[in-house]
Amino acid sequence: MNKTYAACSKNWTGVGNKCFYFSGYPRNWTFAQAFCMAQEAQLARFDNEEELIFLKRFKGDFDSWIGLHRESSEHPWKWTNNTEYNNMNPILGVGRYAYLSSDRISSSRSYINRMWICSKLN
């Protein structure tokens, strides 16, 4: 029996039980998170390798903000809902805000403008 999922909103792409939105222009992390929240979403969260591979493929050549952040390099990475990241993929760098680059997850300061990805359950 085929699983059926609720359709995602226009301009959103469905994978598993989530809908993802890929921005068309760069902004800082704070703006990106506020944008996602206005769509009843958060900066992107992935829960397995399949979702991460999808995000890397669909974001194109742009570095894109995702929903991981930390208080300092001494603190654990957390999602925007404050659940701890399981470190299934290491995050490079000493920044406080995470983004997807072409082949890894890196970190930097929040004020740098990048594309971003939102996610929400569908």
Image (cartoon, rainbow, N blue to C red):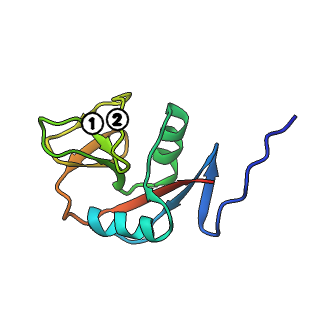
Residue beneath the point at 50% across and 32% down: 49
Crowdedness near tag 1: few (<14), some (14–19) or many (≥20) residues, C-alpha within 10 Å: some
Residue type of the residue flagged with mark 2: Tyr
- The Cα–Cα distance between marks 1 and 2, rounded to whole angstroms, is 10 Å
- Of the two numbered discs 1 and 2 in the rendering, the one whose residue sits closer to the viewer: 2
Q: Which residue is mark 2?
A: 85
Is residue 31 placed above or below 55 in the rendered structure? below
Q: Which residue is mark 1?
A: 91
Q: Quadrant location of residue 115?
A: bottom left
Left or right, 71 with respect to 116, comes to left
17 or 53: nearer the viewer: 17
Crowdedness near tag 2: few (<14), some (14–19) or many (≥20) residues, C-alpha within 10 Å: some
- In contact (CB < 8 Å): disc 1 and disc 2: yes
Mark 1 or 2, nearer chain start? 2
Left or right, 49 with respect to 98, comes to right
In percent of width and height, residue 20 lies at 54, 56
Residue type of the residue flagged with mark 1: Ile
